[in-house]
Structures are given as structure tokens and as C-alpha cells.
Amino acid sequence: MSVKNTVAILGAGRIARVHAESLNRYAQNVTVKYIIDPYMDDKMRKWAETINISYAENDSARMFADREVDSIFICSPTPTHCDYILKACESGKNVYCEKPLDSDISRIYKAMEVVEKSGIKFLMGFMRRFDTSQRKMKDIIASGKVGAPQIIKLCSRDPALPSYGYIKTSGGIYFDSMIHDFDLARYFSDSEVVEVYATGKALIDPQVGELGDVDTAAALLKFESGAIGLIDLSRQSNCGYDQRTEVHASKGFVQVGNVPESSVIVNNEHGVTHDRPVYFFLERYEQAFVNAQRTFFDIVNKDKEPPVTMYDGLQAVRIAKAARTSYLENRPVKLSEIE
């Protein structure tokens, strides 16, 4: 007999909508009962009605007291994450948490300790790990077919600049965007980062710099294994979602390329042409979000081990903080400097 799960989503922004609509469309025996956001308005409530969410509220108290809710998806602003995790532990609710785990490392350590004692199930939502191509790449590396990783190259370029409002509150490019690449670099290397050097500049729009961030960034990672990580990011590719991955190893290399809008290739006297990459992460990782959600409910219902843990979330935050420090102080930063 199938287990039925009742879910609440904390947050009502873009990533919360992605999860709510994906769960409504693809998840069997899962009901999204609540969506909670302190800025909930009539427009959001009408949207919630269209996907059969019973309660769209601006306070979480009733939801945490509702014993029918067994799991929460934390999609709220980063500084709220560990507070919600602690409340979930108190009420016995399992947690799927979007990245970053939190902005405060001391809160992360406290939450890790409480989660372990509480026995709730937890999955860190680094969705790129659940992408079919990235998982296959990891399996190939783990099999030894290409040998030991030596150089890990990650490229992530968004199609266009986000709003200034987003930039003001995002925590910076190393924290809100490159954190995915930090996690993938650890994932593929199977080694810990020991040192980071990061640089960046507001080359696309000077106002990004005036807001205290950069729109063009790079980072060099050193791993315990001796491997090297190379990451470059841009807020504007002009051609869609440009995201490529390569691991060069001792016996060969393995790559994951862009996902095009279609697989059609035209060959004629003018050359060879094909479609540009899909527009954004929503299209590129639509199935990855579904895979991550299914993994979460397998953890909850079948007692499976989480493939992405709070420790993974902690390490990504530490690397992001090291990168931000490196950028600000123009020097390499050892991970041991980050508490």
C-alpha cells in the first residue's frame, strides 16, 4: 500500500513555486497542504488555489501544529533556514532544504546537532546532483574508467542579469550562485577543498558593483587530493543557460555539455547550426527537481540514506564564505580560516 505524504512549503518565491508545481504535477500520493510566506498576498493565494493548496498563509504556527503535515520544503530566504529546521525538529517534520543551508555557520552547527538527535529525515536540495547527466558523470568517475580527477572545470552563465532587488538580497554571486558549483566540485572530486582564491568584477553593469556584488566571477579551488578546481560564472550569457562541466583525470576526461532547445542540427553550404541552450535553470533542471523530490520521499518513506546531507550544505557554505573573503581581501583563503 502506497504511503501518502502531506507537505508544507515555506516561502512563496520562484523556487517555492517550482517545488509546489512539480509536486502537484508529478508526485504521486503527495499533497501540498500549506504554502507559507510572511508577504503572502491575494495574487499568491489565487495561484495556490490553481494547484489545490488548501492554505496560503503568512504565519507558520498552524502548519507546525498540524500533525497531518509530515514534511516541509524550506524555500524561504537563506537566513531563515536553520530556524525553520529547528522548528521542524520540535514538531517531528522531515525537511527538504533549498540551498544555501544558512548564512550563519554557528546556526548550521546547532541545527546539525538537533537534527541528528531528533531523528527527522533531511535532504539538502542541491538539485544539480540529481540531474541524470551529472549523476552519470559521477558514476563514471567513481568507476575509475577515466582515472583519478586532476582538473575539475565548471562553467555557469545565466541568460541575463537578475533584478537589482534580487542582487541586494541574494548574499552575493559566490553565495547564491557559485555555491552550486562548489558543491558539484566536491561531488566530482570526492575530496575536500582546502584553499580558495576568488576574483570578480562588475563588467556587465556597474550598478551591480555599487550594490556590493560582481556579475563576472572566477574561483580556483585546491583539494586535499591535490586536484584543482576551476570555476567561472557570469550573470549574462546572451544565448541562454550556458552550463558545462568537465573532469580531466589521469586516464581521460568526461564532460557534460549544454542542453539545447532541440536536438535538430542543420547542415548546408552555410555551415552547421543547432539551437541555443535552453533559457534558464527552470528548463535545464526541471527533471532534476522531480528526481530530488522522489529521492526525498524515498528517504522519508523507505528509510533510505540521503545522498546530500547537512554536512554537504555546511561545506558549500564554508567554501562560499572563503571565496567571498578571498575576493574582498584579494588573497587565497584556507578553509581552516572559516570556522
Image (spheres, rainbow, N blue to C red):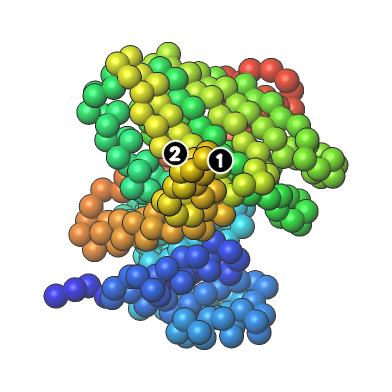
Residue wearing tag 1: 270
Q: Considering depth in this image, is 55 or 104 the residue closer to the camera?
A: 55
Q: Residue furthest left?
A: 1
Camera-nearest label, 1 or 2: 1
From mark 1 to mark 2, how far is it between C-alphas?
Answer: 24 Å
Residue 56: x, y in percent? 55, 81
Who comes first in sequence, dot 1 or dot 2? 2
Q: Residue at x 55, y 73 (%)?
A: 36
Circle 1 packing at 10 Å, graded few (<14), some (14-19), many (20+), is few
Considering only vertical position in the picture, is 30 above or below 295?
Answer: below
Q: For the C terminus, which image quadrant? A: top right
Q: Is residue 338 left or right of residue 94?
A: right
Q: Residue at x 84, y 40 (%)?
A: 206
Kind of residue sitting beneath label 1: His
Q: Considering depth in this image, is 279 or 48 the residue closer to the camera?
A: 279
* CB under 8 Å between discs 1 and 2: no
Residue 135: x, y in percent? 32, 42
Residue 303: x, y in percent? 22, 56
Q: Residue at x 57, y 54 (%)?
A: 279
Residue 286 seen: yes
Residue 76: x, y in percent? 57, 61
Kind of residue sitting beneath label 2: Gly
Q: Residue at x 64, y 76 (%)?
A: 40
Residue 148 seen: no
Quadrant in the picture for residue 129: top left
Residue wearing tag 2: 257
Q: Considering depth in this image, is 56 or 218 the residue closer to the camera?
A: 218
Q: Residue furthest front?
A: 269
Q: Is residue 182 left or right of residue 204?
A: left
Considering only vertical position in the picture, is 160 above or below 72?
Answer: above
